[in-house]
Image (cartoon, rainbow, N blue to C red):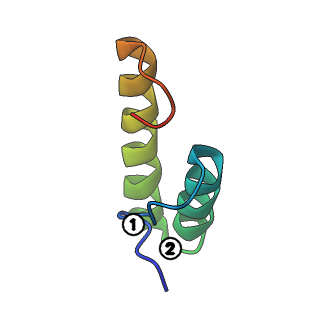
Amino acid sequence: MPNPEQPSADLEPQDEFAVRTAAAEALPLVERADAFSALHDELRTRLESGGSASA
């Protein structure tokens, strides 16, 4: 099973996000909150830097 923190390089950015989101949903509450916080931070950084989805 792929590690949601290290998604496969052959996934499209949308697929990578979907895999990481689904993996986070399966975690216990505290770990789920941490996983969604990390996703939020990453997406915010991408938007603020003007980077593409693959950045």
Q: Are marks 1 and 2 in contact (CB under 8 Å)?
A: yes
Give how far apart the Cα atoms at labels 1 and 2 are: 6 Å
17 vs 19: above or below: above
Picture coordinates of residue 15 (x, y %)?
A: 64, 55
- Could you tell me which quadrant the C terminus lies in? top left
So how many labels did they put on this image? 2
Picture coordinates of residue 36 (x, y %)?
A: 47, 50
Q: Label 2's element?
A: loop
Tell me which residue sits at (52%, 64%) in the image. 24
Q: Amino acid at mark 2?
A: Leu
- Label 2 CA crowd tier, 10 Å (few <14, some 14–19, many 20+): few
32 vs 26: above or below: above
47 vs 3: above or below: above
Comparing 37 with 53, the one in front is: 53
10 vs 38: above or below: below
Tell me which residue sits at (41%, 25%) in the image. 46
Q: Say left or right for 25 vs 44.
A: right
Picture coordinates of residue 32 (x, y %)?
A: 47, 62
Give me the disc on residue 27: 2
Tell me which residue sits at (37%, 46%) in the image. 38
Q: Which residue is farthest front?
A: 10
Q: Which residue is farthest bottom?
A: 1
- Label 1 CA crowd tier, 10 Å (few <14, some 14–19, many 20+): few
Residue of label 1: 31
Tell me which residue sits at (35%, 15%) in the image. 49
Give me the disc on residue 9: none
Q: Amino acid at mark 1?
A: Glu
Q: Say left or right for 8 vs 22.
A: left
**Residue 50 occupies which quadrant of the picture?**
top left
Q: Label 1's element?
A: helix
